[in-house]
Amino acid sequence: MNIKFLKNSEPNFSENLKGLLDFDSSNSEMIIETTHNILLAVKEKGDEALLEFSKKFDDLDFTNAAELEISEADINEAFERISLEQKGALNESAQRIFEYHTKQKMESWSYEDDEGSMFGQKITPLDRVGLYVPGGKAAYPSSVLMNAIPAKVAGVDELIMVVPTPKGERNDLVLAAAKIAGVDRIFSIGGAQAIGALAYGTETIPKVDKIVGPGNAYVAEAKRKVFGLVGIDMIAGPSEILIISDKNSNPDWIAMDLFSQAEHDELAQSILICDDEGFFTRVKKSINNLVETMPRKDIIKTSLENRGIFILVNNLDEAAKVSNLIAPEHLELAVDQPKLLLDKIKHAGAVFIGRNTCEAVGDYCAGPNHVLPTSGTARFSSPLGVYDFQKKSSLIELSENSASRLGKVASILARGEGLFAHGLSAEYRIKK
Amino acid sequence: MNIKFLKNSEPNFSENLKGLLDFDSSNSEMIIETTHNILLAVKEKGDEALLEFSKKFDDLDFTNAAELEISEADINEAFERISLEQKGALNESAQRIFEYHTKQKMESWSYEDDEGSMFGQKITPLDRVGLYVPGGKAAYPSSVLMNAIPAKVAGVDELIMVVPTPKGERNDLVLAAAKIAGVDRIFSIGGAQAIGALAYGTETIPKVDKIVGPGNAYVAEAKRKVFGLVGIDMIAGPSEILIISDKNSNPDWIAMDLFSQAEHDELAQSILICDDEGFFTRVKKSINNLVETMPRKDIIKTSLENRGIFILVNNLDEAAKVSNLIAPEHLELAVDQPKLLLDKIKHAGAVFIGRNTCEAVGDYCAGPNHVLPTSGTARFSSPLGVYDFQKKSSLIELSENSASRLGKVASILARGEGLFAHGLSAEYRIKK
């Protein structure tokens, strides 16, 4: 297999790297227009539009929008159908995700100053959240856990899940995960119409305050459109892994870790940085040996050949610098002294420290979230967390003395800005 | 003056209220297209495009993009030109904003579990942030302090400010505030072209990781467009105040507090909720007496007549419920026992507790941020804060035992999702 090879000591390294990282994230005019029309129809016709789209896109012939809701009995039956082993794994995973995320919960705080005034921040959960879950092949029960549990830890009162069920086909593992995670209601609807229903509300589907969860290009475009009316999580790009390895890692392990990213889809990006040129040869050999045994080998090959990158550096210090340029979604530190390397890492969604720690375990059950900033957005954004389902209100309570003293300060600044009523409002509180 | 009057006991109250809160936030096709073209030009032609737009929009005839930068000497001179009183007020305000925001700073954390594995969250500041500051009439030094100081508290290394200076006209107070707040570089450029320059970078203006600060419709549209490539703060709608008052407040104070919101612009919204019908009459009398003395009386009248609302409720419990429906940007609790009422408030940008605490003091110098979620977005978003300039990386370090035990769990779930390489990657770490 032919994987691109760069050396960070070469001239134009940054530009070449940038070229290999870039991808076209823009939606076609057709997607933009179709999404616009679907959202408009849902906004104007509510349930009626949902029934039409369900017929058209999912071949579901409902006469009543209430049929879109998946009943508790159906969810329980799905849960009973999955294997004991799967139930155990989902439960253990949910428990670990719950424990980690509990540590993220923000608490209200306040303090009093020496003039007797109080300042603080009140933390409250969102009232109602929508969770989009893709249907078909990309139906991932782990995503249900990772999106739903932080919302529940935050104290979100009502969590509404939407999932397309083309021709009525439901995924038992997805429904079981929703039950375990504490999802409150589930509707079998997907696409831009599901985002519209959650953002505007219909007779049957309640309007939510925020929508999270991954989806196809129509879903992403719809989320972008309703942003502002409701909150949304980040719009994710293709998934990436960056592995920094020294020459002492097992090349089979590194190859398989690269595969675990590449198998997601053709645009997924797997990058290996090493300070030893010979190690790349060994990893390449492992790749060639192992890839033919992979059920998703075609996707893996396309992804590695088109988007994979090997980068040779002189030392691990330089590896950290290159990693900070990339700001990867997933970063594995497969080196002898990973903690020393970690200190130099500034931008990454999640860091998997040491050779024992593979991304795959983090994807499912280590505890931290697997919804992470992609495509370099770790430069300015964070993993999905409890904090995404809580919000803050500033608190200010001025004593008479503070109001009087600060009233004078505010008055000077207000008049400097030409805001006379602001000035007077503050001046009324100045003690005579 | 004619101000709309609702009773929450009336049928259709919610629908009527919703109708009065709504405003059209969509940008015209013309704005969308112009912005698109400006961004494209900046992306493709860099500095050359900036010089063209500066000539076209700001009448600035620069031949070299370096001239766009405002020199340190010029900033220092601006600082020297403002009055001693203004320097003192800006400094006191900056100091208080700094102190409050210091309490918001997030710290990294980690813990070890009983299998010897480590889990945590590493907090790092953004590297470089862009701050948009409007020029002309809406040039607010207080906004510079409120946007810049949290970034500096977070530890942002480089803070780049952009501000339009039509015909070269600079605002001394704005430049002085930037100096006090620790802004690193200032460029005299505005509009969508400034947003493009910060998002893509040009030869002269460095690319940033996040853009904050208010602007006109072109700026808002440009921020929406570059969202994803860089982070942005919320796109603000018109500003609002909601005052919950009992009958014991001074009606002049309440009138002036309503004015302080209404004077911002015609779309600003001022709402008063009270449990006493007679109090509305007294406030109306104050409004009519006071409004003619206001320099911005025309704006105030238009705003109050078109967008102002008086709402009569039966008791303060109901007032809290109505307030939670509105999720106001600013909420004043001008009642005898404001702390009791505060307990019932779920959604608000900032709460001003007690009759002494007017919004105007909060706008300038109380300490908490004045950049707050507008138009009901307090249901899902928060005041601008230090947390907007920090980001999180998840940390996972598995012991051999954890990797082995959790490898089995991950393997079951990965195979359930059809992700074979994920499964094998985890299985490699299972101890034989």
Image (spheres, coloured by chain):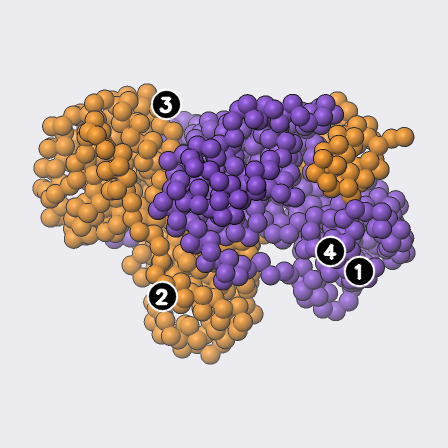
Chain colours: A orange, B purple
In the rendered structure, which amino acid carries the disc numbered 1? Ile
Q: Are marks 1 and 3 in contact (CB under 8 Å)?
A: no
The residue lying toward the viewer, choosing from B218 and A92, is B218
Residue A245 in sight from this viewpoint: yes
Residue A343: mark: 3
Q: Which residue is mark 1?
A: B3
Alpha carbons under labels 1 and 4: distance apart: 10 Å
Q: Position of residue A363 (x, y in %)?
A: 33, 43
Alpha carbons under labels 2 and 1: distance apart: 46 Å
Q: Quadrant of the C terminus of chain A?
A: top right
In the rendered structure, which amino acid carries the disc numbered 4? Ser
Q: Chain of mark 4?
A: B
Q: Secondary structure at mark 3?
A: loop
Q: Position of residue B403 (x, y in %)?
A: 29, 33
Q: Chain of mark 2?
A: A
Alpha carbons under labels 4 and 3: distance apart: 54 Å
What residue is rendered at 57% in x and 41% in y?
A: B167
Q: Mark 4 packing: few (<14 Cα in 10 Å), some, or many (20+)?
A: many
